[in-house]
Image: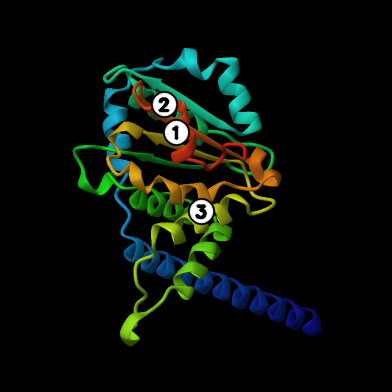
Amino acid sequence: MVVAQTHKDAARARSDIQQMLADQEAKNRENSRIKLWKWLSPPNVSTDHELARGRHHPGTARWFLRDDLFEVWKREGSLFWINGKPGSGKTILSFAIIEELSRLRPQDGVAMVAYFYFSFQDAGKHSLRNLLSSLVMQLSLKSDNYYDVLAKLYESAPRLNGSKYPDPPTTSALSRCLREMLELPGTAPKYIIVDALDECPLLSQHRALCETRPSNSSRNSSSLALMGCAYVSLAAARTIFGLLSRP
């Protein structure tokens, strides 16, 4: 009986130690995520999402979410380009799509959803760099695998003049980071929704995003939805956001 109790106590001690180590690892990752957030300084996209929530009425966009085209897009992964006149409800549609995708529970895990709302009214939501920093940060918060990719970028970033902290990443570096995340094998489906493409005035930066296009092998695991005004062409959208378009 004494031997059995000793084995039981030892097993309990091992379990306690393993839990302590797991808790410490989780705490270290949380602290690191805070450090990465400060390094990237991404804009707060949740404010735009909550504003859209306040303007959304029950049942709005249900017709779109039940359409066969939307179902095919969710299942197969592709570029889904939606345009329309200013004030025609694209932002509310973006909100509805994000909410719908966030509720998905596919076989290989909870769907990974990242989004961005461009805005003329917010200087922090004009640039492609801020778009990319927001997307990679959102993904890294949802998965340790994505976190590892971003942490690697942080550790490899140059530090000028012996600085303790690395320089902010370039747009090209963020593009490569996002591409690496999208190409990770064995991860849940990934969906990226970008609203108000026409409110990004710095379109001359668009070529850096072409580097983020995943390879053929990973195309079916990622999907991209874009919203823009009628005067932003589909050709421009494919060029600017080459994330998932075919080579």
Asked where in the image residue 236 lies, by quadrant, the reply is: top left
In this view, the mark in front (3 or 1): 1
The residue wearing badge 2 is 233
Q: Residue furthest left?
A: 121
x, y percentage for residue 51? 26, 32
Amino acid identity at mark 2? Ser
x, y percentage for residue 168? 34, 67
The residue wearing badge 1 is 237
The residue shown at (51%, 58%) is: 177
Amino acid identity at mark 3? Leu
Q: How is the image coloured?
A: rainbow
**Pick the front one: 161 or 91:** 161
Q: Say if residue 223 shows up in the picture.
A: yes
Q: CA distance from mark 3 to mark 1?
A: 18 Å
Disc 3, SS = helix
Q: Earlier in the sequence, mark 2 or mark 3?
A: 3
The residue shown at (39%, 62%) is: 170
Q: Which mark is residue 178?
A: 3
> Is residue 53 rendered to the left or right of residue 190?
left
Q: Is there a contact, CB below 8 Å, between mark 1 and mark 2?
A: yes
* Disc 3 packing (10 Å; few <14; some 14–19; many ≥20): many
In this view, the mark in front (2 or 3): 2
